[in-house]
């Protein structure tokens, strides 16, 4: 697939100039808004315009309408929970369209406008879409107790709940898949719908990272495969728990793993691969506007002469789950939706 890099850059450049213009135009159109907005709300309005431009730029760049639709559905839930009327947001999108259309060519506008038309339709539709998956598995009860303890700030009970379960035979993989992952998704949903604070979300995440570290003695790995995998997040990407979980699944399946974590500079990843010569590099991205960074990392890895052409590049994370075939279009060898699928795919892909 041809990426639209120039248009991406043009839209991203507007992030620094357009937010105050849209705010002024919206206030001009709706003096009632100008009268009631606090300084804080004015700041948030401008941040939201910049955010919309980030997601629009990346979705247009990748030719993936579905990524922008998902973002707009997410934004609808997020802003509804803080009582922002959808009519106002739709009006802002129309003002953004006007400004973009004044600055872009007819051909460019033909590419961009369908994205904005869909956005307005989603915002004004009656139904409320909650785009994140809900809980529901054989450890739901434990997951519920676990999240309740964390939301009360009781890390010790949360830790004890998990440790007791593991000591009585539940595997670490089950805990990861059926407790930590759905709990993290639920924490995200609670934050998105304004039911918990950023501080509570940070506390829960940090506590779960602590519990994960306590589980290391229980990761019986059995036979080693004599295969190496490197896991990394792209520059700017701060979501690292999914990447960590996938890495731990590889470790538990006998691979030697090298986890680099969040926000890794591309050049350092390439250098590390040259030194280590792994069989697999796994790249994680959660935010849609980081997919270009994944594409860039893949391109740099593939065009480095000292890296074996047999190296398999696997990608994963939220945007790849939403957009079918996105992984192929940016040059990856494989994609998996979760840690369980990632390991079975890697074992079929890398046999030597
Ligand atoms: C914790 C968290 C954070 C923490 C992360 C800390 C850390 N150390 O990781 C912090 C506070 C930093 C954070 C920041 C932000 N976050 Co946040 N965050 C979350 C949260 C609640 C949990 C993430 C998590 O741990 N998930 C659990 C793991 C296990 O799931 P996973 O990542 O999907 O991984 C699985 C698969 O995707 C797959 N996988 C993942 N990577 C890979 C790689 C490969 C190779 C393979 C094969 C598979 C694979 O396998 C994994 C295991 O099965 C999510 C909610 C959610 N739904 O995920 C929001 C969420 C992702 N964040 C969100 C947002 C908006 C943000 C911010 C923009 C907030 C802000 N205003 O600043 C920033 C952006 C930061 C950035 N630049 O990256 C939104 C994204 C919405 C959207 N439309 O994109 C979410 C969805 C919350 C929500 N419901 O609104 N966040």
Image (cartoon, rainbow, N blue to C red):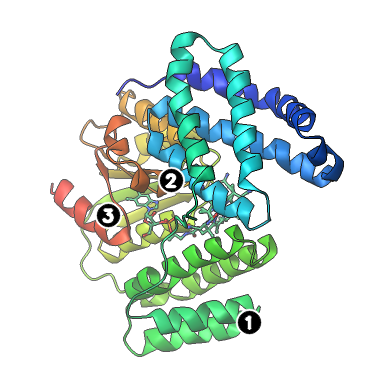
Quarter-of-image position of residue 256: bottom left
Give whichever of discs 2 and 1 has the lower sequence position: 1
Tell me the distance, in whole angstroms, between the alpha carbons under discs 2 and 1. Answer: 31 Å
Q: Please give the residue where the numbered disc 1 appears in the rendered image.
A: 154
Label 3: which secondary element: helix
Q: Residue 63: percent from the left, percent from the top? A: 37, 28
> Is 201 situated left or right of 109 in this image?
right
Asked if ligand 1 lies within 8 A of label 3, the reply is yes
Q: Residues within 10 Å of mark 2 (few under 14, many from 20)?
A: many
Work out whether residue 81 or residue 196 is closer to the camera in this orientation and state it.
Answer: 81
Label 2: which secondary element: strand
- Count the marks: how many? 3
Q: Please give the residue where the numbered disc 3 appears in the rendered image.
A: 342
Label 1: which secondary element: loop
Query: In this rendering, which labeled residue sits more in front, label 3 or label 2?
Result: 3
Position of 288 relative to 6 (above/below): below
């Amino acid at each position: 697939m041809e990426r639209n890099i120039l248009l991406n850059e043009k839209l991203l450049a507007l992030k620094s100039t357009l937010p105050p213009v849209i705010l002024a135009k919206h206030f001009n159109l709706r003096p009632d808004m100008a009268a009631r907005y606090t300084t804080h709300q004015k700041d948030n309005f401008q941040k939201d315009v910049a955010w919309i431009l980030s997601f629009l730029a990346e979705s247009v760049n990748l030719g993936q309408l579905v990524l922008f639709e998902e973002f707009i559905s997410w934004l609808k839930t997020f802003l509804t929970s803080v009582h922002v009327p959808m009519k106002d947001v739709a009006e802002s999108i129309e003002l953004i369209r006007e400004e973009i259309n004044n600055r872009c060519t007819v051909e460019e506008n033909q590419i961009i406008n369908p994205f904005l038309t869909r956005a307005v339709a989603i915002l004004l539709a009656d139904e409320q879409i909650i785009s994140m998956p809900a809980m529901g598995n054989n450890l739901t009860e434990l997951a519920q107790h676990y999240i309740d303890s964390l939301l009360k700030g009781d890390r010790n009970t949360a830790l004890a709940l998990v440790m007791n379960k593991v000591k009585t035979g539940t595997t670490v993989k089950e805990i990861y898949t059926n407790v930590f992952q759905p709990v993290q998704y639920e924490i995200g949903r609670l934050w998105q719908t304004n039911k918990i604070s950023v501080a509570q979300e940070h506390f829960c995440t940090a506590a779960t990272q602590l519990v994960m570290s306590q589980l290391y003695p229980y990761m019986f790995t059995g036979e080693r495969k004599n295969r190496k995998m490197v896991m990394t997040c792209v520059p700017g990407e701060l979501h690292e728990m999914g990447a960590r979980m996938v890495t731990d699944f590889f470790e538990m399946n006998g691979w030697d793993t090298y986890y680099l974590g969040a926000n890794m500079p591309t050049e350092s990843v390439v250098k590390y691969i040259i030194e280590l010569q792994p069989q697999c590099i796994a790249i994680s991205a959660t935010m849609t506007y980081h997919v270009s960074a994944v594409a860039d990392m893949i391109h740099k890895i593939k065009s480095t002469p000292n890296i074996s052409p047999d190296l398999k590049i696997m990608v994963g994370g939220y945007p790849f789950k939403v957009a079918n075939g996105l992984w192929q279009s940016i040059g990856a060898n494989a994609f998996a939706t979760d840690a369980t699928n990632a390991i079975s795919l890697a074992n079929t892909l890398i046999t030597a």
